[in-house]
């Protein structure tokens, strides 16, 4: 029989220069109806009043808390890992420093992960755009019991897996599988973490309610503006995070739909975009270095296998053909188009 004493849940909040919104975020966590809560705020070397504001609120909250100040800015991944190392809870929740949640966010996720004895549980969420002041909801109409089914929904673009903030994880599960955030990147690290976690899990569950609000600021996101050199750099990180996640999934599933998506769509699509961005940026040395991979039979087979998705995205297949058989022409066309746009 289960004990009436509920487990400690640790909420990890990485923060950097969040003085404008950290107060409402912390209040959203403090006001959760789940009682046995630990809040860990990890300050990633803020230069504003984030720490001072947070300390005052936490000290008067009546909640267990830790306020950890990092000495080196390591971005969100490093801050989350710092929080993981310090967490005392049996369960882990990650919370962004400018987001909000429904009062029953933690209790709903906790009940589900306990009832289903799952390794991880997630819920629906809404995204609030600061630009157009509108909300957009993301919720799945289907509830599965097998991790593979959620990966299949993701592969067929029926399920949005954006970040870790609408999840709860068993801490023992994370430790056992050495699941941590990649500290060498600061883009798409959430998606890599989620996909790996689902791939190695025994049981995943879903709460069919919108319980979390993510505040979306488009200026912080990677865009398709190839004139922005930072975008070119960011995509390199995105490519490696998705490649690592894809390899992990391939290692743990035999599902044909998932494997086809990763091998014949995800990998070649990202590689193609990487080459395209380098051409648009005028980086011929990098471009030439990348297309050397086409000498390998396996790589060529993967690029040609994009034919399986010709009805979904015909451009992917035809661009792959040009990259394989006329790479110099492809470079000239993409770099010329970039100059015309400028």
Image: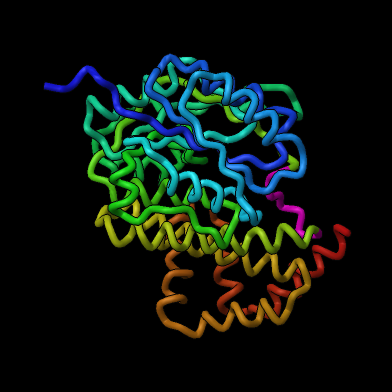
Q: Which residues are magenta?
A: 220-227
Of residue 104 and residue 155, the one placed in the foreground of this image is: 104
Residue 226 sits inside the magenta stretch: yes
**Measured from the top left, where is residue 263 in percent x and y?**
40, 62
Q: Residue at x 51, y 46 (%)?
A: 80
6 vs 48: above or below: above
Residue 136 visible to an observer of this rendering:
no
Please give left or right for residue 101 compared with residue 287 in the image.
left
Which image quadrant: the C terminus?
A: bottom right
Q: Is residue 22 left or right of residue 202?
A: right
**Does 57 sit left or right of 158 as displayed?**
right
Residue sitting farthest toward the left: 1
Q: Quadrant of residue 331?
A: bottom right
Query: For residue 204, which quarter of the picture?
Result: top left
Check residue 272 for magenta coloring: no
Q: Position of residue 142 (x, y in %)?
A: 34, 28
Main secondary structure found in the magenta portion: loop
- Residue at (33%, 42%) from the top-left corner? 171
- The quarter of the rendered structure image containing the N terminus is top left
Could one spot residue 85 in this view of the protein? yes
Residue 201 image point, x, y percent: 28, 46
């Amino acid at each position: 029989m289960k004990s009436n004493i509920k487990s400690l849940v640790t909420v990890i909040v990485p923060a950097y220069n969040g003085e404008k919104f950290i107060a409402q975020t912390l209040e959203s966590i403090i006001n959760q109806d789940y009682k046995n809560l630990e809040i860990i705020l990890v300050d990633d070397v803020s230069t504003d009043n984030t720490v001072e504001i947070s300390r005052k609120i936490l000290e008067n909250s009546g909640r267990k808390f830790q306020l950890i100040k990092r000495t080196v800015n390591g971005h969100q991944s490093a801050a989350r890992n710092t929080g993981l190392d310090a967490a005392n809870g049996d369960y882990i929740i990650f919370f962004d420093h400018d987001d909000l949640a429904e009062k029953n966010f933690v209790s709903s996720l906790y009940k589900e992960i306990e009832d289903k004895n799952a390794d991880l549980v997630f819920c629906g969420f809404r995204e609030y755009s600061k630009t157009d002041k509108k909300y957009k909801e993301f919720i799945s109409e289907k509830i599965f019991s097998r991790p593979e089914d959620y990966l299949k929904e993701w592969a067929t673009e029926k399920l949005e897996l954006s970040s870790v903030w609408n999840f709860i994880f068993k801490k023992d599960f994370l430790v056992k599988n050495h699941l941590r955030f990649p500290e060498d990147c600061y883009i798409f690290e959430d998606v890599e973490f989620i996909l790996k976690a689902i791939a190695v899990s025994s049981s995943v569950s879903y709460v069919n309610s919108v319980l979390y609000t993510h505040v979306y600021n488009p200026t912080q996101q990677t865009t398709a503006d190839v004139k922005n050199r930072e975008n070119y750099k960011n995509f390199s990180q995105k490519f490696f995070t998705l490649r690592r996640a894809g390899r992990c999934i391939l290692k743990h599933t035999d599902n044909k739909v998932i494997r086809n998506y990763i091998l014949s769509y995800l990998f070649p699509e990202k590689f193609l975009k990487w080459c395209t961005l380098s051409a648009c940026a005028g980086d011929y040395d990098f471009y030439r270095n990348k297309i050397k991979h086409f000498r390998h039979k396996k790589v060529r087979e993967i690029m040609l296998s994009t034919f399986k998705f010709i009805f979904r995205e015909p451009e992917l297949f035809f661009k792959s053909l040009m990259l394989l058989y006329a790479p110099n022409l492809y470079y000239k066309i993409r770099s010329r188009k970039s100059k015309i746009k400028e």
